[in-house]
Image: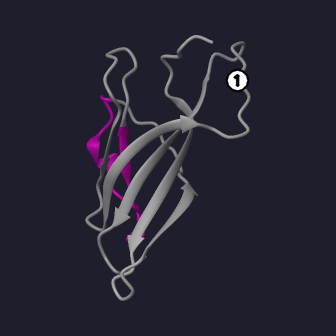
Amino acid sequence: MTASTEPPYYLLVSLSSLQHSSGSSSNSLAHANVEYRYADDSPLTLLPHHPDEHVLVLNHDPVKGEIPTVQSTSTHMAVTGVKVSMAPGASTNEDYGRNDNMFVLEVASTSDDQ
């Protein structure tokens, strides 16, 4: 199998929260709504549309070969890491030309509100 220059096909968000009262941590995985934005799009499109929305910006340019970066536009959510891992159950089929790995965006809440 050859390495793909395409970004991973799947994307999940791993939300870690620290329970301040008990001191224990918990993790949950969620599917993200993905919207594609391009360099010539207005940066205003990256702002949340409602108060409970959190926007994470994943910058990936396979042509430049740079490591993908993720930023949060929310003051209540911080990005703590990005992992690329195998997507369980995804079939690798080179005929499709897609990268069947997945991004796991690791984020943490910076407030007590979830």
Query: Residue 12 magenta-drawn?
Result: no
* Residue 87 placement, left or right of 71: right
Question: Going by the picture, which residue comes out furthest to the bottom?
Answer: 21
Question: How far from the left and from the top, in percent, is residue 40?
Answer: 30, 29
Q: Where is residue 8 in the image (x, y as percent from the top left)?
A: 53, 31
| Residue at point 56%, 58% (across, down) | 30
**Main SS type for the magenta part?**
loop
In this rendering, position of residue 97 left or right of residue 59:
right
- Within 10 angstroms of label 1, few (less than 14), some, or many (20 or more) residues? some
- Which is more toward the observer, 37 or 2? 2
The spot of residue 94 in percent (x, y) is 69, 14
**What residue appears at the point 37 percent right and 71 percent down from the top-left corner?**
51
Residue 38 picture location, percent across and down: 37, 30
Compared to residue 18, the image places residue 46 above or below, namely: above
Q: Where the C terminus falls, by quadrant?
A: bottom left
Res. 77 image quadrant: bottom left
Q: Vertically, is 100 above or below 71? A: above
Residue for badge 1 = 92
Q: Quadrant of residue 19?
A: bottom left
Tell me the magenta residue range.
39-58
Amino acid carrying mark 1 in the image:
Thr
Q: Does the magenta stretch include residue 44?
A: yes
For mark 1, give the secondary structure.
loop
Residue drawn 39% across and 43% down?
82
Residue 83 vs 19, above or below: the answer is above
Number of numbered tags placed on the structure image? 1
Which of 1 and 70 lies nearest the eye of the viewer?
1
Is 67 left or right of 97, judged from the image as shown?
Answer: left
Q: In which quarter of the image is the N terminus?
A: top right
Q: Which residue is drawn at 70% across and 23% down?
A: 92
